């Protein structure tokens, strides 16, 4: 029993002696040198302001009647393409026809009176030349003839007006275009100035949008605008065509019209977005090749004054195909590794060339 206890004590002593031994020394990790490009973080990214709008025709015409009357028929539908001078609708012309008949009767009566006055004038002319009547009597006949002739002219003018009214009973298209709205229907009362149809004329299309008053000062006629139409794959290069200088007092916004290029598939009524460039941002930009993603976070290697790489986490903002905006973690002018390597570690030396831009 004593022998077993002795062996146990010896085993424990040996184990303790082994634990008390000095630990194995580990040296610091070796520093590597990398030939990687270095660049300064720059600013100058465009500040964009986006609005929504609709595609409209450059010329939208409200077609109305010049007469007051009930609409007898409308000959076109929405989407129909029409030509200039084509009859679009007809107004009930019963009253107009009555006016034409009255005008014709008035002209016939005035012509009869004028012929009779002419006969009297010729007869009294001969009598006056023979001295059979006085100058006073001849002047009275001439005055009666002049009055009859003036009455005839008035009757003819009235007939011309009635005939013009008859022509207005057929409402014609003022230009080539497409019918986009039927505001009235057959049987409705048409009055002068009240739209019956809406016609969009011309091939030129615009994006009509509204800009808030704090941004309108940065938008000028002629400035380029990137326009994205939902149904089109590629963005369009538009140009500010008009800025309406009168704002809406409720929304405090101003209407802006953007001229669009001729594009297949682009039609009035489509929804779109306009991206206005209203200045430059002071936030630094870094190339995508410089970014390192770890655990869903992004960072870069900044190069210090001793040309050593120091990893730094970033908060990023807007993105482009080749660049990313940094909103926190980096200052403009700081040097960084423009194209990183997976094996690059914090503290490694960077000996690569410095480039102006990526």
Image: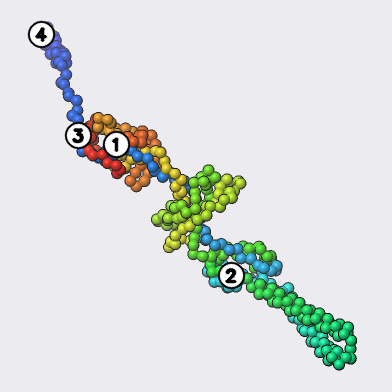
Q: Is residue 105 left or right of residue 256?
A: right
Q: Is residue 235 above or below residue 117?
A: above
Task: Name the residue carrying label 3.
Answer: 33
| Residue contact at pointers 3 and 1, CB within 8 angstroms | no
Task: Name the residue carrying label 4.
Answer: 3
Q: CA distance from mark 4 to mark 1?
A: 72 Å
The secondary structure type at the circle numbered 1 is strand
Report crowding for label 1: few under 14, some 14 to 19, many 20 or more residues within 10 A (C-alpha).
Answer: many
| Figure quadrant of residue 157 | bottom right
Query: In the rendered image, which quarter contains the N terminus?
Result: top left
Q: Nearer the viewer, mark 4 or mark 1?
A: 1
Task: Name the residue carrying label 2.
Answer: 173
Q: Residue at x 12, y 7 (%)?
A: 2
Q: Give x and y (percent) for residue 187.
A: 67, 67
Q: Nearer the viewer, mark 4 or mark 2?
A: 2
Q: CA distance from mark 2 to mark 1?
A: 67 Å
Q: Is residue 187 above or below residue 250?
A: below
- Pick whichever of labels 2 and 1 is earlier in the sequence: 2
Q: CA distance from mark 2 to mark 3?
A: 79 Å
Q: Residue at x 84, y 91 (%)?
A: 129
Residue closer to the observer: 231 or 46? 46
Q: Residue at x 41, y 54 (%)?
A: 235
Report crowding for label 4: few under 14, some 14 to 19, many 20 or more residues within 10 A (C-alpha).
Answer: few
Report crowding for label 3: few under 14, some 14 to 19, many 20 or more residues within 10 A (C-alpha).
Answer: some
Q: Residue at x 36, y 36 (%)?
A: 332
Q: CA distance from mark 4 to mark 2?
A: 125 Å
């Amino acid at each position: 029993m004593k022998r077993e206890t002795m062996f146990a004590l010896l085993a424990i002593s040996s184990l303790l002696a082994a634990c008390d031994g000095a630990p194995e020394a580990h040296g610091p990790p070796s520093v590597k040198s990398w030939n990687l490009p270095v660049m300064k973080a720059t600013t100058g990214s465009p500040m964009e302001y986006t609005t929504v709008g609709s595609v409209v025709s450059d010329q939208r015409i409200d077609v109305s009647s010049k007469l007051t009357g009930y609409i007898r028929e409308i000959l076109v539908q929405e989407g129909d393409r029409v030509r200039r001078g084509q009859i679009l609708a007809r107004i009930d012309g019963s009253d107009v026809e009555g006016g034409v008949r009255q005008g014709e009767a008035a002209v016939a009566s005035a012509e009869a009176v004028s012929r009779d006055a002419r006969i009297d004038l010729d007869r009294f002319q001969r009598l006056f030349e023979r001295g059979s009547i006085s100058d006073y009597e001849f002047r009275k006949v001439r005055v009666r003839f002049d009055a009859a002739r003036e009455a005839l002219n008035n009757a003819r003018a009235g007939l011309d007006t009635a005939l013009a009214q008859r022509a207005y009973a057929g409402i014609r298209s003022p230009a080539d275009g497409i019918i986009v709205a039927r505001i009235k229907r057959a049987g409705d009362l048409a009055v002068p100035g009240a739209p019956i149809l809406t016609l969009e004329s011309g091939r030129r299309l615009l994006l009509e949008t509204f800009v808030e008053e704090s941004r309108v000062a940065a938008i000028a006629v002629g400035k380029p605008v990137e326009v994205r139409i939902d149904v089109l794959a590629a963005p369009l290069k538009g140009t500010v065509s008009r800025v309406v200088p009168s704002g809406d007092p409720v929304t405090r916004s101003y209407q802006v019209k953007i001229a669009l290029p001729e594009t297949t598939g682009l039609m009035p009524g489509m929804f779109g977005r306009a991206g206005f460039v209203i200045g430059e941002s002071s936030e630094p930009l870094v190339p995508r090749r410089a970014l390192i993603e770890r655990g869903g976070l992004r960072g870069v290697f900044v190069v210090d004054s001793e040309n050593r790489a120091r990893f730094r986490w970033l908060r990023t903002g807007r993105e482009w195909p080749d660049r990313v905006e940094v909103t926190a973690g980096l200052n403009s002018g700081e040097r960084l590794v423009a194209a990183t390597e997976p094996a690059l570690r914090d503290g490694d030396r960077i000996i690569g060339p410095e480039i102006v831009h990526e």
